[in-house]
Image (cartoon, grey):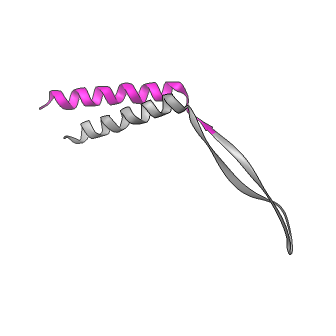
Amino acid sequence: MKPAGIVGIILIVVGIIALAYGGFTYTKREKVIDAGPLQVSADKEHQVQFPPVLGAICLAGGIVLVAISSRKS
């Protein structure tokens, strides 16, 4: 398979995942107090959102790349 076809398939998968999940969350441990032997930390949850337009653009671009890759054979 040509490199354009492989990149197209990857973009299709990324677009589907971005549209299905819409983002992800992760937890980060931050120090609240650091006073000598006394340390207090807190877990903070952060969210990263993907705009639906980003997923649609990745999906459409992947389909175009796969179509172009298959036509040039």
Query: Which corner quadrant of the image does residue 70 belong to?
Result: top left
Tell how many labels: 0
Answer whether residue 67 is magenta in the image: yes
Which residue reaches farthest front?
Answer: 20
- Image coordinates for residue 47, horizontal then vertical, percent: 65, 40
x then y, percent, for residue 11: 37, 35
Q: Main secondary structure of the magenta part?
A: helix
Residue 18 spot, x, y in % from top left:
49, 32
Q: Nearer the viewer, residue 57 or 18?
A: 18
Relative to 68, is 24 on the left or the right? right
Q: Residue at x 52, y 25 (%)?
A: 52
Residue 16 lies in quadrant: top left
Q: Residue furthest bottom?
A: 37
- Picture coordinates of residue 71, whole percent (x, y): 16, 27
Extreme residue toward the left, this view: 73
4 horizontally vs 48: left or right: left
- Give the residue displayed 22% in from the left and 28% down from the top: 68
| Residue at horizontal 47 percent and vertical 29 percent from the top | 55
Above or below for 24 versus 31 = above
Magenta-colored span: 48-73
Magenta-drawn stretch contains 60: yes
- Residue 52 against residue 23 in the figure, above or below: above
